[in-house]
Image (cartoon, rainbow, N blue to C red):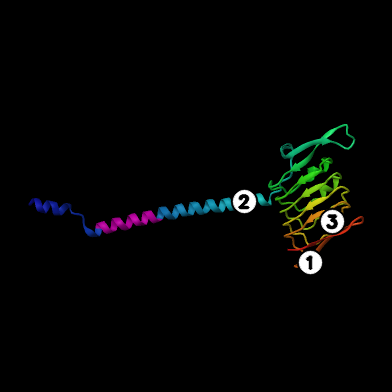
Amino acid sequence: MSDEDDLDDFEPDQDDLEKEDDEKDTEDWEDNRKEGEEYSEEVKGAALLHFLLQRMPTPLTEDMMKEALSLLCKTGNGLAHAYVKLEVKERDLTDISLLRSYIHLRYVDVSENHLTDLSPLNHLTHLLWLKADGNRLRSARLNELPYLQIASFAYNQITDTEGISHPRLGSLDLKGGSLGPGALAHACNPNRGCLLLPQI
């Protein structure tokens, strides 16, 4: 056998080369498909976790209060001091029942949470300023708060203004709510008449 014949024996067959290329392409496709499935499962898992977190109750806690309280002032009798300002926005809160016991609060910001009920604020009889924008409120109903001057309930799902009756209320924001188009939101009090707010 000549040297040329020996070389011929070592030359790869074209069909074998094409078969190897096909197998490599198939392996690459399988790897990519598996990676895609793993990524897809991760995305689904993250979306599910986000959904569950939104559904889980998130109450206001004492630890949150410690971080969020500020502005130390004298209380009504002038013999004691208390923090009078609270800012707990963007905490995914669904429950602010704890505020019932913080009766000296005057400035409260609970905006950008998931609140549907503000009734714990009925206990804050010294409240001057309230911001509850961007929650899931269908009503802004509160007991009459004698010192409340500024209240904002923008970008909620409020459908009427029933229960907004505070004697010193001078500024009320209901923009972005669910009142009918062109409707006038009104909040009345016995001393000053009504606030009229055109819906935008």
- Residue 28 appears at what percent x and percent y? 37, 54
**Main structural element of the magenta stretch: helix, strand or loop?**
helix
Residue carrying label 2: 50
Which structural element holds mark 1?
Answer: loop
Q: Residue at x 87, y 49 (%)?
A: 145
Q: Are the residues tagged 3 and 1 within 8 Å (C-beta)?
A: no
Mark 1 or 2: in front is 1
Quick one: 174 or 194, which is closer to the camera? 194
The picture quadrant where one finds residue 173 is bottom right
Residue 19 counted in the magenta span: yes
Residue carrying label 1: 183
Q: Is residue 45 left or right of residue 10?
A: right
N-term mark: 3 or 2: 2
Q: Which residues are magenta?
A: 16-29
> What amino acid type is highlighted by mark number 3?
Ile
Quick one: 113 or 84, which is closer to the camera? 84
How far is mark 1 from mark 2, CA to CA?
36 Å
Which structural element holds mark 3?
Answer: loop
Residue carrying label 3: 164
How far is mark 3 from mark 2, CA to CA?
34 Å
